[in-house]
Image: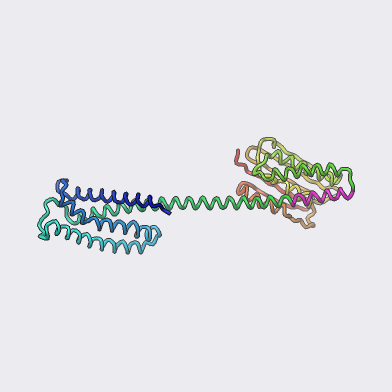
Amino acid sequence: MKSKKHYIKQTLLHLFFWCAVLFIFTLVFSTGNTLDVNTFYFSVFLMPITIGTTYISIYKLIPDYLITKRYALFSLYTFYTVIISIFCIMFSVFFGLAFLTDFKFTEVVSLSRNTIFIISCIYLVVIIVSAFKLLKLNLKQSKHNAELEAKILEAQLKLKQQELSYLKMQIHPHFLFNTLNTLYGFALKKSETTPDLILKLSNLLDYVLYQVNKPLVELKDEINHIKDYISLEQMRFNDTLNIDFKSDNCINNLEIAPMLFLPFVENSFKHGKIVNGTLKISIAFKCDNEHIDFSITNSHQNNQSTKNGIGLENIKKRLELLYKNDYDLDISETKNNYSVQLKLHLNNG
């Protein structure tokens, strides 16, 4: 809501402007640029039609028809306004001259301008004021569009953050489900390695609970987390696991979104096939300042149904949200192997 003070300020500004126009009219219409009371009175007669035409233009024609792109109606009503205003100007000139000559219609010496010039001066004022009004409305519309765009971007960002939070929440139960199954198996066997397994699980949960909520984590911490998980799985598989892990040049302070690679590792253990008594898994990281290349391959038989599971679908959505157009994901399946290759394009190079 506009305040009373604002309306008073606008009114005073308009009064000042029209007083300035009256002074200019008096000066322009006089002979030899000499101010004369008759020219002043004549200019006063012209002010109502000047003000009326101007306000019709800036408060009706421009905002209601031109800005809203109703060009046909704008042209039609502008034509009507011009015709009516010209008639009113002629009427004002006639009665102005009649008043100044006491209805004798003799020549007014101090008035040096003809009717066409008078009409041109009035419409010059209308055009100038209309141009400023149009500029003001365009600036206001641009500001409104910018604010609207900012609100849309803010809403999209909040939606993205909420979706990411939801996806991260899915990581916890999925991770716990796989790991607790392992712990349950050791508990049934009353294995002596159960306490060590619980300790490793505690370390893993500490990472999941506290690091996953960060927008970015160091790549070396993510790799160490994967190594801890592999160590935990090695206890479960014992001699049936043959794993090859490499992380070349990945000691730099590269940062990534947390828990991007672990779902692929989990799925290799969960869906990998023990062939000839061994589950073979090969994991490799290759890094530079601009890229992270991750690949994982596990032994597999393609006659077995391979399900992506929650974790893999989750990671695909997260990649699309976090690294849209900045990642390449390739999942391939052969007779004996199931492979995933993920390449991240970092923006810190």
127 magenta-colored:
no
Quadrant position of residue 201? top right
Foreground of the two, 43 or 166? 43
Q: Does the magenta stretch include residue 176?
A: yes
User: Magenta part of the protein: which range?
Assistant: 173-189
Q: Is residue 17 left or right of residue 263?
A: left
Quadrant containing the N terminus is bottom left
Asked whether, in this view, residue 279 is left or right of residue 139, the answer is right
Magenta stretch, main secondary structure class = helix
Q: Position of residue 192 (x, y in %)?
A: 89, 43
* Residue at figure coordinates x 64%, y 41% from the top left: 291
Specify whether residue 82 is in view: yes
Name the spot of residue 10 as percent of width and height, x first. 34, 51
> For the point 69% across and 37% down, which residue is it?
250
267 or 135: nearer the eye? Answer: 135
* On screen, residue 82 above or below 3: below
Count every numbered label the image shows and give the total.
Answer: 0
Q: Is residue 117 left or right of residue 216?
A: left
Where, quadrant-wise, is the C terminus in this rendering?
top right
The reply to whether residue 336 is in sight is: no
